[in-house]
Amino acid sequence: MQARFVLLPGDGIGPEITAQARRVLDAVGTQFGHQFEMSEHLIGGCAIDSCGDPLPQETIAACKESTAVLLGAVGGPKWDDPRAKTRPEAGLLRIRRELGLFANLRPTKTWDELIDASPLKKEIVQGTDILFVRELTGGIYFGDSGRREHASGEEAWNIMNYSTGEIERVVRLAAEAARGRRGRLTMVDKANVLEASRLWREVSGRVMQEEFPDVEYNVVLVDAMAMHLISRPRDFDVVVTENLFGDILTDEASMLPGSLGLLPSASIGSGGPGLFEPIHGSAPDIAGRGIANPLATILAAAMMLRYSADLTAEAEAVETAVAKVLKAGHRTADIGGGDSSVGTEAMGSLVLESLTA
Ligand code: NAD
Ligand code: IPM
Ligand code: MN
């Protein structure tokens, strides 16, 4: 088949990890006889430096014409001035919105090969397999915001709003996913305090009752969920929640498998090109040192093959290649590699060898 993949390396470790995913995609193309056309475009801080805009028009156009988009990460201390006119992160939010990507799937599964990489006890985490479905184009990330004068100096606000339609579509997508898994859906909110959460609870409950009576459904408050996640993670199958809660809970959940450097994600929704990315950021503390874990991005590339190009065997080949590398004991520093840690490029090479072995 022919596919056109847009790569957005971004900032910090972004270029280092996307380079490894690109090698893997090239190898998959050769091995399975596909033509993958790949082009790289600017997003985030590097785009601000180059043209003053974290999401140049040219990048938007390329993404819209693509089969799918693979992103590294954006952001970093260079662009962190709170008074700056624009920010790298604004580019990422805009591309999600431009492409209509209202659902962000973040699978969180422990690897038996890596069970000791988790800071949590093996008896608690082993066998965890959760699919988080994070709402991605609404809520407080996109609501009205501003600042104004205040007697004490200034005041600032961000509004969280959700409409019935925004809730229905993401809950349906999560419930469909649950049907294809263990048949359980947990909706996480803060309905004891927030009006927006009360609408989530009403709409979600109705959709589940009317359309998914076969899916076991429960609701959990977000503060309690933060605790249940690390005390009984195996009890959860699919978890659906609003944008900000999903952002926070999934970074927490990355400690179940052991590192942010392992978690891929797929942003989908509109039926057009999807956006695939690791859940982690640009890791400025290790950028440029060649030690970042590229596996989350490589696994995001596998999700891209599966969801955007329907290449299931190819996606599985990449995932199996990663599992074999871990099974053979190869580790980057973030997953307990210690003195024998392999670097970013070496990890990429190991996955390639395993893929073509
Ligand atoms: P981060 O995810 O970049 O890093 C958190 C910690 O995890 C750091 O110690 C980092 O070294 C480590 N880490 C992350 N990815 C790793 C990898 N692949 N291998 C090894 N270790 C890894 O979060 P942060 O430091 O809070 O944010 C840094 C910047 O990234 C900020 O500007 C933030 O806005 C941005 N950010 C971007 C994205 C994105 O582009 N999708 C996501 C999160 C954060
Ligand atoms: C993520 C990131 C982004 C988010 C930031 C960089 C805008 O943390 O993808 O998880 O909050 O969605
Ligand atoms: Mn995040």
Image (cartoon, grey):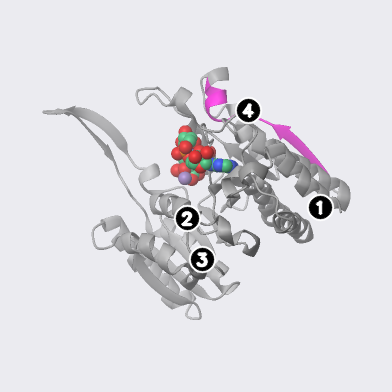
**Type of residue at label 4?**
Glu
- The disc, 2 or 1, on the residue closer to the chain's N-terminal end is 2
Left or right, 159 with respect to 237, comes to: left
Q: CA distance from mark 1 to mark 4?
A: 34 Å
Quadrant in the rendering for residue 17: top right
Which numbered marker is on residue 134? 2
Please tell me how crowded label 2 is: few (under 14), some (14-19), or many (20+) other residues with Cα within 10 Å. many
Is mark 1 in CB contact (under 8 Å) with mark 4?
no
Is mark 4 in CB contact (under 8 Å) with mark 3?
no
Left or right, 260 with respect to 231, comes to: right
Quadrant in the rendering for residue 303: bottom right
Please tell me how crowded label 4 is: few (under 14), some (14-19), or many (20+) other residues with Cα within 10 Å. few
Q: Which residue is mark 4?
A: 58
Q: Which residue is mark 1?
A: 355
Left or right, 193 with respect to 269, comes to: left
Q: Nearer the viewer, mark 2 or mark 4?
A: 2
Q: CA distance from mark 2 to mark 4?
A: 28 Å
113 to 278, vertically: above or below:
below
Element type where label 1 sits in the image: helix
Is mark 3 in CB contact (under 8 Å) with mark 1?
no
Q: Which residue is mark 3?
A: 125
The residue lying at 25 percent from left, 30 percent from top is 147
Element type where label 2 sits in the image: strand
Is mark 2 in CB contact (under 8 Å) with mark 4?
no
**Type of residue at label 1?**
Leu
Q: Magenta region: which residues?
A: 35-48
